[in-house]
Image (cartoon, helix red, strand yellow):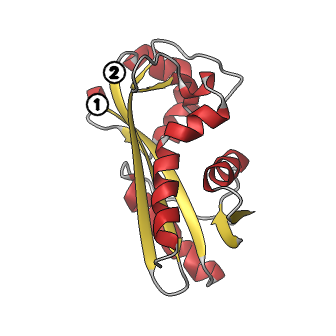
Amino acid sequence: MKNIIFCTGNKNKINEMQSILGDEFKIEGKKIDIPEIQDVNVRTVVEKKLDYAIEKLQQPLIVEDTGLYIKNMNGFPGALVKFMLDKIKNNGISKLMGGSNATAVTVIGYYDGEKKHFFEGKKYGTISEKPKSMKKGFGWDPIFIPKMKDNNKTFSQMSIEDKNKISQRKAACHKFKASFSQI
């Protein structure tokens, strides 16, 4: 079993990553107060988070960030989506951008003790006209409808197992897992 330190306080992200990576990995969440730069680009945010976490912990670790790029907003809000959620919630995003194409992007930054590595996953979809199944999922799961054949469900309407089979986090995790033995 490979132990991985994941610098986050978000239990949902820890649980999803553990579920996706499986029993081969043991994800240990470590909450450290990482200053987060304000940038639309998820990769840029992850690079800065990784540098800070390496400086503080000086050991192998991962950081992660996820953004939502809405086509009709020229790719905004990207990594700044958490601020939109804080201010206008999923309802506001749906009212403004319902029906718009969007791309969900997750970037994992991994430090192996010597080098930094980055793994990106994307999932294309649309913003729903209104939030659905607000009791399940987290973040913008209630408004993101992933593109796939015969699908009209948001991430929050799917079981966690179904979401984890197709999500952008799964794509990033699988790239990480595939290269882990080569790192």
Question: What residue is drawn where x is 66% and y is 70%?
Answer: 4
Q: Nearer the viewer, residue 33 or 10?
A: 10
Write down the quadrant of residue 29 in the picture: bottom right
Amino acid type, residue under disc 2 in the picture: Ser
Q: Are the two marked residues, 1 and 2, in contact with CB atoms closer than 8 angstroms?
A: yes
x and y percent of residue 21 in the render? 62, 56
Query: Label 2: which residue?
Result: 100
**Residue shown at 26%/35% (left/top)?**
74
Determine which quarter of the picture holds residue 9: bottom right
Q: Which residue is mark 1?
A: 71
Measuring 71% from the left and 59% from the top, which residue is drawn there? Answer: 23
Mark 1, secondary structure of its residue = helix
Image x and y of residue 95, in percent: 44, 14
Question: Local crowd at mark 1 within 10 Å, few (<14), some, or many (≥20)?
Answer: some
- Residue 158, relative to residue 12: is it above or below? above
**Image spot of residue 120 (x, y percent):** 40, 55
Question: What is the secondary structure assignment of the residue under circle 2?
Answer: loop
Is 104 displayed left or right of 29 in the figure?
Answer: left
172 up-or-down from 97: above or below: below
Residue 156 in the figure: left or right of residue 49: right
Specify the amino acid type for callout 1. Lys
